[in-house]
Structures are given as structure tokens and as C-alpha cells.
Amino acid sequence: MDVKLEEYVTAEEYYALPEGTHAELIDGVLYYPPYGQAAPARKHQGLLMKLSKEIDNYIEAHNGDCRVYPAPFDVQLNKEDDSVVQPDISVICDPKKLTDQGCLGAPDWVIEIVSPGNAGYDYITKLQKYHSSGVREYWIVDPTCDIIAVYNLSTDRLLPKSYTFQDIVPAGIYDDLSIDFKKITAAL
């Protein structure tokens, strides 16, 4: 992600950007995809769709209150903080956080699917931001390495559990949801 160096930008100014502007705001700094970057790769989009569907199907089958929102979906992590991100997948279990603009407050579970050129942004910048804002669980799905890094952010330790695309990965916010990545990736 490229940083646009200019003056501090508030969440209110972010929401006033022209419709269709692809950017995220972290601590008052706008981040844009690299100029001329193509749309996400087919594998990225396939993972996004299959993971969203798997999680949503689980929630529906269990009459759960959580909601699944794939990108683009604005998440203002904290009302007092000028940070608005668009996670690849957001799972929000408190309906009071949902607004007409998106989500105001930390989602319970965030999944980012790494694209070439933004790995550091997902592994460092967003990890720190999600941890400090109260996201409970954060998955980084990296299709270039076929790994999934799972962070339990409700602890102070930022050490992930690592899985491969051949593993069944348990979701920490649910006792009985596990995602079989071998099955998910077989048709990509």
C-alpha cells in the first residue's frame, strides 16, 4: 500500500472522499493501493468468496447473531480514532456496531488475504491496529506461501499459530467452527 503524504485526515474527511475511492485510513494517514495496481488476483477473490460463504453458512446453521461482510466494507475501528479500514472479511457479532456507513467499533474476527505488494501492511500495520482496537481474532491468509497465520488478539502475545492450505483451521471465536483449507482451495 502506498502512503499519501499530506496533512492529517480525519474519519469525517475519509467518508467525504469521492465514491469509489479505494483507500484506508490509519491514525490519520491515508493508504492507497499502488498506482496502477490491478484488481485482486483470482485466487484472492476465490478465497474471499469461499471463506465468507463458509463462515456465513456456519452462522446461519447455528442461528447466530454475527454478520459477515466481505470487502469493500468500511470499519472505523474506534470512534475516537481516525482509522477506517476495509478488511477482506469482517465478522461482527454486536449489531449495535453496524451503521449505514459500515461498522463503528472493532469486529470480532478479521481476515485479510495478502496480495503481492501489501504483505507488510497486513502483517505489521494492520496487526498492530487490530490488536490495539480490540479485534478478538485476526487471520492472515497468504496465498503466495499457502499459509494462514491465526492471531488470538485477546491476549498480549502477538505470536500466531501457523497453518498451511492443507490444514483444518479452528476459529477461535466459535467452539465448533473449523475451516478445511484443503477443501476450500481445491477448486481455486
Image (cartoon, rainbow, N blue to C red):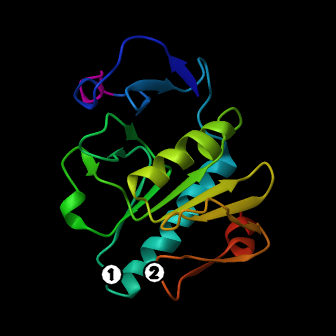
Residue 60 point in image, percent of width and height: 37, 80
Residue 157 point in image, percent of width and height: 60, 63
Front residue of 41 and 152:
152
Residue at the location (32% across, 21% down)? Answer: 9
Measure how far apart labels 1 and 2 are at the Cα level. 8 Å
Identity of the amino acid at label 2?
Tyr
Q: Main secondary structure of the magenta part?
A: loop
Q: Residues within 10 Å of mark 1 (few under 14, many from 20)?
A: few
Residue at the location (81% across, 52% down)? Answer: 145
Task: Determine whether label 1 and label 2 are within 8 Å by CB.
Answer: yes
- The part of the image, by quadrant, that contains residue 23 is top left
- The part of the image, by quadrant, that contains residue 2 is top right
Number of the label disc, if any, that sits on residue 64: 1
Where's the N terminus, which quadrant? top right
Identity of the amino acid at label 1?
Gly
**Badge 2 is on which residue?**
58
Where's the C terminus, which quadrant? bottom right
